[in-house]
Image: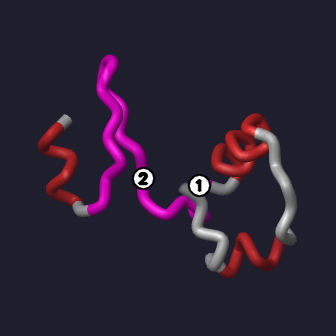
Amino acid sequence: MVNQEHYKYRKKFTLQCFSSEDWITLIQNHPEIMKQPIALRGNKTLWVKTPTDIIWI
């Protein structure tokens, strides 16, 4: 889920073993390091890879 090649990730973080809570905090505070956005609607979740994927949710 996290693009570890993103320049902001490489600039701020080194290769570490993060807990699940740490990863969530990283994504919340630095959403730009996500590979793709996640769409949520009700109980449906979709990893959006293209703009038209949002239609499916």
Quadrant including the C terminus: top left
- Mark 1 — residue? 31
Q: Which residue corresponds to the image point at 19% horizontal and 52% vertical from the top-left?
A: 53
20 displayed left or right of 32: right
Q: Disc 2 and disc 1: Cα gap in Å?
A: 8 Å
Instruction: Classify residue 7 by image quadrant.
Output: bottom right
39 displayed left or right of 30: left
The percent position of residue 46, horizontal first and vertical second, equals: 32, 41
Compared to residue 28, the image places residue 37 above or below, namely below
Quadrant including the N terminus: bottom right
Camera-side residue of 12 and 20: 20
Q: Secondary structure at mark 1?
A: helix
- Mark 2 — residue? 37
Find out whether the residues at labels 2 and 1 contact each other: C-beta distance under 8 Å: yes
Colour pattern: secondary structure
The answer to which of marks 2 and 1 sits earlier in the sequence is: 1
Q: Which residue corresponds to the image point at 76% horizontal and 77% vertical from the top-left?
A: 10
- Magenta segment includes 11: no
**Three-letter code, disc 1:** Pro
Instruction: Classify residue 3 by image quadrant.
Output: bottom right
Characterize the local packing of mark 2: few (<14), some (14-19) or many (20 or more) Cα atoms within 10 angstroms. some
**Three-letter code, disc 2:** Pro
Stretch in magenta: 31-49
The percent position of residue 11, horizontal first and vertical second, equals: 80, 78
The percent position of residue 21, horizontal first and vertical second, equals: 76, 35
Q: Secondary structure at mark 2?
A: loop
